[in-house]
Amino acid sequence: MDAQHGQVQHELVMPERERILGVPVDVTDMETTIAGIVAAVEDHRDGARPWNAPHLVVTLNPEMVIRAQNHAAFRAILEDAAVVIPDGVGVVHALRKRGHHEAVRVTGADLVTAYLPIAALHEHRVAFVGAGPGVAGKAADRAREIAPGIQIVAADSGHPTKETAERLAKYAPEVVFAAYGAGKQEEFLHRFLPLMDAPVGVGVGGTFDYLAGVVHRAPDIVQRIGCEWAWRLLLQPWRIGRQRALPEFYLRELHERRGG
Ligand code: UDP
């Protein structure tokens, strides 16, 4: 990205793809991820080729890696994704232990915030879908403050169903951010991006909650020391069930690296 002019260069770098417990993950960064989104929208606008492969961006965390061990359908969606970005700190640690010392976290929340001004610049048609009642709307209002002029063509709290996708399709979105929690949001996008004729979909987890101010994101220092998961647990203790996957991830990942 040319920071001075806010332009995204379209020379695409293909990030290296690694595997953790059989799950694909790309050693990439924010700039490359956003450049990929912009390029996919451009391709769609150009109609350069039949559009049958939307650009699905998955924000991967250790819970999702464990989920993929037990759900073949979810594993298949991850295989189909255009980009799998390392969102969770556990995923980044695993990449570094495998020799990718340059690996960094690229979270869904940071991606959305960094992308908003780019979306405004390129006049992308953006849709927010999912989260609790009214949250997508509030998040869209905040996004319009962050990036004046951005075209958020739909903000819909609907469930991850065909009806929701059909409703969104009427607004011809180009980039759909979906917040239905890990698994559901990727299933929704994988299934319905073609119906919406949307070139890009990104599963963004709790991002709308942060943008809307419904949930406070961990302070920078907590993020930097790799403890955002603990902050989330503190704020939302019901996460304990889901976070049981974390020790399982660390043990299985270590076992895999040791050739087990
Ligand atoms: N969510 C939803 N329907 C569901 C589960 C979750 O709309 O069945 C929303 C939830 O309100 C939140 C977002 O999805 O706004 C992300 O959920 P969560 O924080 O559990 O996802 P994570 O970030 O842990 O993947």
Image: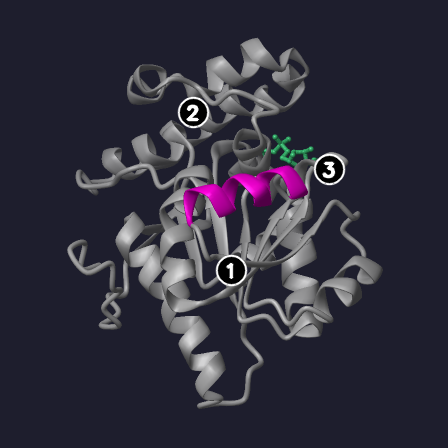
Contact between labelled residues 2 and 1, with CB atoms less than 8 Å apart: no
Say which element carries label 1: helix
Question: Would you say the beta carbon of the disc 1 residue lies within 8 angstroms of ligand 1?
Answer: no
What residue is disc 1 on?
A: 79
The image position of residue 198, as x and y in percent, is: 59, 70
Asked whether the viewer can see residue 258, the reply is no
In this rendering, would 243 be left or right of 31? right
Say which element carries label 2: helix
Chain part drawn in magenta: 137-147
Q: Which amino acid type is shown beneath numbered disc 3?
A: Gly
Examine the structure image and report whether residue 126 is included in the region drawn in magenta: no
Q: Earlier in the sequence, mark 1 or mark 2?
A: 1
Closer to us: 253 or 184: 184
Q: CA distance from mark 1 to mark 3?
A: 33 Å
Say which element carries label 3: loop
The image position of residue 95, as x and y in percent, is: 29, 39
- Quarter of the image with the C terminus is top left
**Residue with the most extreme right position:** 163
Examine the structure image and report whether residue 140 is included in the region drawn in magenta: yes
Q: Earlier in the sequence, mark 1 or mark 3?
A: 1
What residue is disc 3 on?
A: 134
Ligand 1's quadrant: top right
Residue occupying image coordinates x 69% and y 38%: 131
Question: Would you say the beta carbon of the disc 3 residue lies within 8 angstroms of ligand 1?
Answer: no
Which of label 1 and label 2 is nearer to you? 1
Could you say which disc has been placed on residue 250 in the image?
2
In this rendering, would 249 be left or right of 180? left
